[in-house]
Amino acid sequence: MPALKELEEAFFYSKKDKEFQRELRHLQKTYIGRPTPLYFARRLTEHLGGAKIYLKREDLAHTGAHKINNAVGQVLLAKKMGKKRVIAETGAGQHGVATATGAALKGLECGIYMGTEDMKRQALNVFRMRLLGAKVTEVPTGSRTLKDAINEALRDWTTNVRTTHYVLGTVFGPHPFPVMVRDFQSVIGREARRQILDAEGRLPDYLIACVGGGSNAMGLFYEFLKEDNPPTPPFSKGGKEGLLDKDIKMIGVEAGGKGIETGEHAARFAGGSIGVFQGCKSYLLQDDDGNVLGTHSVSAGLDYASIGPEHPFLKDAGRVQYTYATDDEALAAFELLSRLEGIIPALESAHAIAEVVKLAPKLDQDKIIIINLSGRGDKDVQHVAKIKGIEL
């Protein structure tokens, strides 16, 4: 608790600290490469034959995913707090790479915890982390995935709290982590809002993102949840009234794995119940006795038993709809976007694309969808090739 209170005070002070905010904006622009583009996926739109589809290109951020937005923010905060070392958990490896990158940038020691199964799936990212100077520790216990990596990172932080900051990678865990990660990721939605108004003269009809812990989805959704946003201007093309924020439909896409009925999935809303896990109350895949169930997803970044607590709140409030895509649907979407747009998505992001493949053809052509393309698929190519029986 003292460590969490110290972090809470430092974080809320940083929001008012002009020097901290100036450095963060400077690094977002010159190091991360923000703003990332909002790209009209013309060929995907034509192929599906319905709504216009835009991709928020977080895959073009430095290190290849949205994770860098939060990692740089937290590493800056750790430096301000006088910490000498940062640690992180990682599943798909992108958060580990982003944290190792931020640590190298600011000259901090870095340790990364990663489950054995994820290290096999994401060998390329393991090498990248070590190349950046991080010590990668294998976690061979439990399910040997993200859940177990978080357990080990929390144990490390508890032991070394005076010198170490834990860069938690998603909108999960004890306060202030869900709020802090959401705020560092909300730059995605702020940019997307401006960009779609420039491109179309109005707000989108749908926002769609994959949901593991939930940081890329919250990063996109949060800016459109605010009641105090100014009214949207009318359409620049056609003279109709513009949409209000409350009219925008938001969809989070979980990992359906091999199907809900098989039990081999990571769809917390479809197959879970409310529980307390790793520092917060949320939806959790658990048995009747509260034991955490095993999970499965073709994508390491979605292979997690729980979800950030703000997502259940938004679901219960009726503001965000949650669904899931199976492994097969995600793999098909992975190939489809690659062929049609020359963009290889992360398998995590492919789950969001899979939902759009089902949704877009049902919508009129004047509807607009924004997908958060949360990461690029370089890290997944070897894994997909193995699934398809191709030797690289």
Image: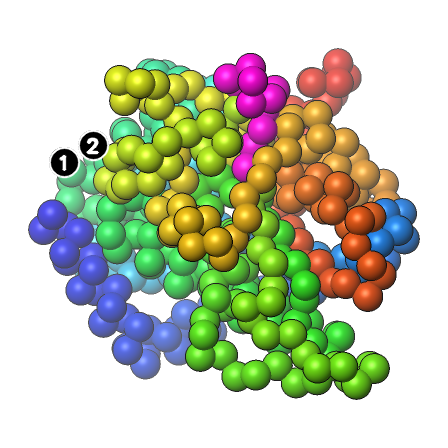
Q: Is residue 173 above or below residue 125?
A: below
Specify the color scheme: rainbow
Confirm or deny contact between disc 1 and disc 2 (CB under 8 A). yes
Q: Is residue 113 visible?
A: no
Q: What's under tag 1, amino acid-wise?
A: Thr
Q: Is residue 170 above or below residue 194?
A: above
Q: Residues within 10 Å of mark 1 (few under 14, many from 20)?
A: few
Residue assigned mark 2: 155
Secondary element at image label 1: helix
- The region drawn magenta spans 254-264
Question: In x, y percent, where is residue 78?
Answer: 27, 57
Q: What's under tag 2, amino acid-wise?
A: Arg
Task: Choose between 144 and 85: the one closer to the eye.
Answer: 144
Which residue: 58% across, 39% down?
A: 323
Residue assigned mark 1: 159
Question: In x, y percent, where is residue 20?
Answer: 33, 73
